[in-house]
Image (cartoon, rainbow, N blue to C red):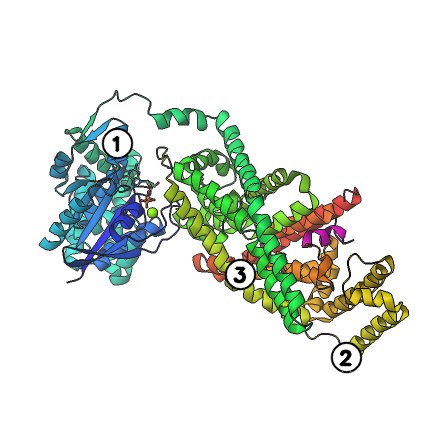
């Protein structure tokens, strides 16, 4: 028989760590709440049984407030795993048992995995598992997920529970006189009408009605409108009554009683503290400094800035190696292949396109490594905690910080998981506002463009400018959020509840896995999507090409110049003599110029050139020429493409690759580009439409209407900002 086992627990309780220990899989061990709301499955063999383990999303509760909670609950009731392992953080037992309490009320067959007993012990907390098991009436197994300690005991306890294949047997807690009376009336109606009784116990459905659970109420209405009406009426009466007498909603009374149940349970000899309870734990001591009202934000900025310095200085060396390797490769192709379309495809389409992206891998790798340190140590949660005060002002929520950071709030990241991470936000309006503004962050794909333009025009102070543009992204995102929250998404804020997990020393293994996973995602994108698009754009930039007549006229021009030169000079060029004589250099230059002229004419006549030129009258106001327009169009598909397209557009005018200039040098020389144009372009690139993949995600999370809104809103905003930058900058001749 196939055995189904589910893993449930609070975020950060160690679910993923345990899942990996049990299945041997290398899954993401991270603290992003809700990056994957879909459950994850793994398999394991134990005592001759094949067990399927499902890692449910981390949740604090089992209501219909957030997508995760629904996914977890629906999985349990519809798939009916024979046993649910509820992993709880022993160092934070009271808070974690709230979910346990709800799982017990649901009636699922439970085994409690008491995790992180090492942490609890270090904090002087001793937990008597046997007493806890006796009170909860389910097995409690102490484990250390990180080391695998207690794994076998846990599995055998789980199998024991699974083998009895017991009926679901819900725990019933008293919710005080008023609610208990209503509950029994509700139960009577539900049982009589047989409402959802094959899925939930009548008492559970009744509690959910009192808790105002949208999903259950909607189902009730769908199945039997009359019964639902009766139930809702009763609930409303009770709610009015409790508001009148106690000035609270029934939900709050229910939560209070659950915590009361847990408190009294813990007081009966479950927890012994070895140290004075008031003693400051190490984490708290650190927090006194790191989250201090005044010092905290200053230290936060310093830490983030240090991350930039680290990233830029350490990634420079391997970055140069990679760039040199690609330059060498182009040179090789240049000398071995005959001139023509194929050569152009390989050099301009493939090597330049992919090389431009791969060259930034070291940068992205170091950045991810730094973020992983912040995340795994628990500091990122403090950042969220501190940011809540600020976020509130802009109509967002402390939990919004994670989506922002995932999307590239510390630069490097991706709006795709960022958009998905907004699922943890409970209020739909705060969620939409977050969803629409996370694409403003500097994702990993924008980094190469930023690095290129900053490196070219502000090379002296790369780290400082990078930091400035990251801050700018935040400021614009916040203002846009405020704008949205006071217009299309107007509404009241929700209260902030957030856990500050204790600080932990990150493991090297964990850091490496995180860094590798994210870098790999980036490379995979570069290798597939980018390569395809780079080739497509190359084709758009190459075809239809110049007419034979025009080509011939250029060839004739070249011949004329050649013919006018002395035979010796011509010979020098043919044998590629080094160094060239003065006359030969002049001849070479003249021919190169003709080549450039021809290439530019070809590009102007290409499909992409026509589009770029037609947009030029509009984009001129922001200082963009048609070449930049082409690159920006490519950026709709994926932001990485901007660099590769600029590379292609600017390398096309190059005939002799011997004196190949890097894209950076080409831009510096080009009369269209200066510091003001660079800032205008940076601003536009940072804030215009999210890439296609992100738009699809927004559409999936919200609707196509919102995706279209995002595309239009961002592009218009970015354009207006770029125009302002360019016009003001030019007016004051800052270029
Ligand atoms: P999830 O959010 O429930 O999936 O939690 P994770 O598995 O991502 O774990 C959160 C953090 O706790 C990670 O940094 C783990 O390395 C760490 N962790 C998990 N289990 C233990 C444990 O038993 N002891 C200690 N000290 N750390 C643990
Ligand atoms: Mg996890």
Circles 1, 2 touching at the beta carbon (< 8 Å): no
Residue ID at (40%, 36%):
377
User: Left of 384 or right of it: where is 627?
Assistant: right
**Residue 173 vertical placement versus 279 (above, below):** below
Name the quadrant containing residue 228.
Answer: bottom left
Mark 3 CB within 8 Å of ligand 2: no
Circles 3, 2 touching at the beta carbon (< 8 Å): no
Q: Nearer the viewer, mark 1 or mark 3?
A: 1
Query: From mark 3 to mark 2, how far is it between C-alphas?
Result: 38 Å
Q: Quadrant of the C terminus?
A: top right
Choose the circle earlier in sequence order: 1 or 3. Answer: 1
Give x and y (percent) for residue 720: 67, 51
Give x and y (percent) for residue 664: 69, 51
The span shown in magenta is: 663-673
Give x and y (percent) for residue 588: 81, 62
User: Left of 209 or right of it: where is 691?
Assistant: right
Query: From mark 1 to mark 3, how far is it between C-alphas?
Result: 46 Å
Task: Assign a secondary structure to mark 3.
Answer: helix
Tell me if residue 298 can be seen.
Answer: yes
Task: Assign a secondary structure to mark 2.
Answer: helix
Task: Assign a secondary structure to mark 1.
Answer: helix
Residue under pointer 3: 692
Badge number at residue 548: 2
User: Left of 723 or right of it: where is 313?
Assistant: left
Query: From mark 1 to mark 2, how far is it between C-alphas?
Result: 80 Å
**Residue 593 vertical placement versus 279 (above, below):** below
Choose the circle earlier in sequence order: 3 or 2. Answer: 2
Q: Main secondary structure of the magenta part?
A: helix
Residue ID at (30%, 21%):
279
Which of the pair 293/318 is nearer the observer?
A: 318
Residue under pointer 1: 120
């Amino acid at each position: 028989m196939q055995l189904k086992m589910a893993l449930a627990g609070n975020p950060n309780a160690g679910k993923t760590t345990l899942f990996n220990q049990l299945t041997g899989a290398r899954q993401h061990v991270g603290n992003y709440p809700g990056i994957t709301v879909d459950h994850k499955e793994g398999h394991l063999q134990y005592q001759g049984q094949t067990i399927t383990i499902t890692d449910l999303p981390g949740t604090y509760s089992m209501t219909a407030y957030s997508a995760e909670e629904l996914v977890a609950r629906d999985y349990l009731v519809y798939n009916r795993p024979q046993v649910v392992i509820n992993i709880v953080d022993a160092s934070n037992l009271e808070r974690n048992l709230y979910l346990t309490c709800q799982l017990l009320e649901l009636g699922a067959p439970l085994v409690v995995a008491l995790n992180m007993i090492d942490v609890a012990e270090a904090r002087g907390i001793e937990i008597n598992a046997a007493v806890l098991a006796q009170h909860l009436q389910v097995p409690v197994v102490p484990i250390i997920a990180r080391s695998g300690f207690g794994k076998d005991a846990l599995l055998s306890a789980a199998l024991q529970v699974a083998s009895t294949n017991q009926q679901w047997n819900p725990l019933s807690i008293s919710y005080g006189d008023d609610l208990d009376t209503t509950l029994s009336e509700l139960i009577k109606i539900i049982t009589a009408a047989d409402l959802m009784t094959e899925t939930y116990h009548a008492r559970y459905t009744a509690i959910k009605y009192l808790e105002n659970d949208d999903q259950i109420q909607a189902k009730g209405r769908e199945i039997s409108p009359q019964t639902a009406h009766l139930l809702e009426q009763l609930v409303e009466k009770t709610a009015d009554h409790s508001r009148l007498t106690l000035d609270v909603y029934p939900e709050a009374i229910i939560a209070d009683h659950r915590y009361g149940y847990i408190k009294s349970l813990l007081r009966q000899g479950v927890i012994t503290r070895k140290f004075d309870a008031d003693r400051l734990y190490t984490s708290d001591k650190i927090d006194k400094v790191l989250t201090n009202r005044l010092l905290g934000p200053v230290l936060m900025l310093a830490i983030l800035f240090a991350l930039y310095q680290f990233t830029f200085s350490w990634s420079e060396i391997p970055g140069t190696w990679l760039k040199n390797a690609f330059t060498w490769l182009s040179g090789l192709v240049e000398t071995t292949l005959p001139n023509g379309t194929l050569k152009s495809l390989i050099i301009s389409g493939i090597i330049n396109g992919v090389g431009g992206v791969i060259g930034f891998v070291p940068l992205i790798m170091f950045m991810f490594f730094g973020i992983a340190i912040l995340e795994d140590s628990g500091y990122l949660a403090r950042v969220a905690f501190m940011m809540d005060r600020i976020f509130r002002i802009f109509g967002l929520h402390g939990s919004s910080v994670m989506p922002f950071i995932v999307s590239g709030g510390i630069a490097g990241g991706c709006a795709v998981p960022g958009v998905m991470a907004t699922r943890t936000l409970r209020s739909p309006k705060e969620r939409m506002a977050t969803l629409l503004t996370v694409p403003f962050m500097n994702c990993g794909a924008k980094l190469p463009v930023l690095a290129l333009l900053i490196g070219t025009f502000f090379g002296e102070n790369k780290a400082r400018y990078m930091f400035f543009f990251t801050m700018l992204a935040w400021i614009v995102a916040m203002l846009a959020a405020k704008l949205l929250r006071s217009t299309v998404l107007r509404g009241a804020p929700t209260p902030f509840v957030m856990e500050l997990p204790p600080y932990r020393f990150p493991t090297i293994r964990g850091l490496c896995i995180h860094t590798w996973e994210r870098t790999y995602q980036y490379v995979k994108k570069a290798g597939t999507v980018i390569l395809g698009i780079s080739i497509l754009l190359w084709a758009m930039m190459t075809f239809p090409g110049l007419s034979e007549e025009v080509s011939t006229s250029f060839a004739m021009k070249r011949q004329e110049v050649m013919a006018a030169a002395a035979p010796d000079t011509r010979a020098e060029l043919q044998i590629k003599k080094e160094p060239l004589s003065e006359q030969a250099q002049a001849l070479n230059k003249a021919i190169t110029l003709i080549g450039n002229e021809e290439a530019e004419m070809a590009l102007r006549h290409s499909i992409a050139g026509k589009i770029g030129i037609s947009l030029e009258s509009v984009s001129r106001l922001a200082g963009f020429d048609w070449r930049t327009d082409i690159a920006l169009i490519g950026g709709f598909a994926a932001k990485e493409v901007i660099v590769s397209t600029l590379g292609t557009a600017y390398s096309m005018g190059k005939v002799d690759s011997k004196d190949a200039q890097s894209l950076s040098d080409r831009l510096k020389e080009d009369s269209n580009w200066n510091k003001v144009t660079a800032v205008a372009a940076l601003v536009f690139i940072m804030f215009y439409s999210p890439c296609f993949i992100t738009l699809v995600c927004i559409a999936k999370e919200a609707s196509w209407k919102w995706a279209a809104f995002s595309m239009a809103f961002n592009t218009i905003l970015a354009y207006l900002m770029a125009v302002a930058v360019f016009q003001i900058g030019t007016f004051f001749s800052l270029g």
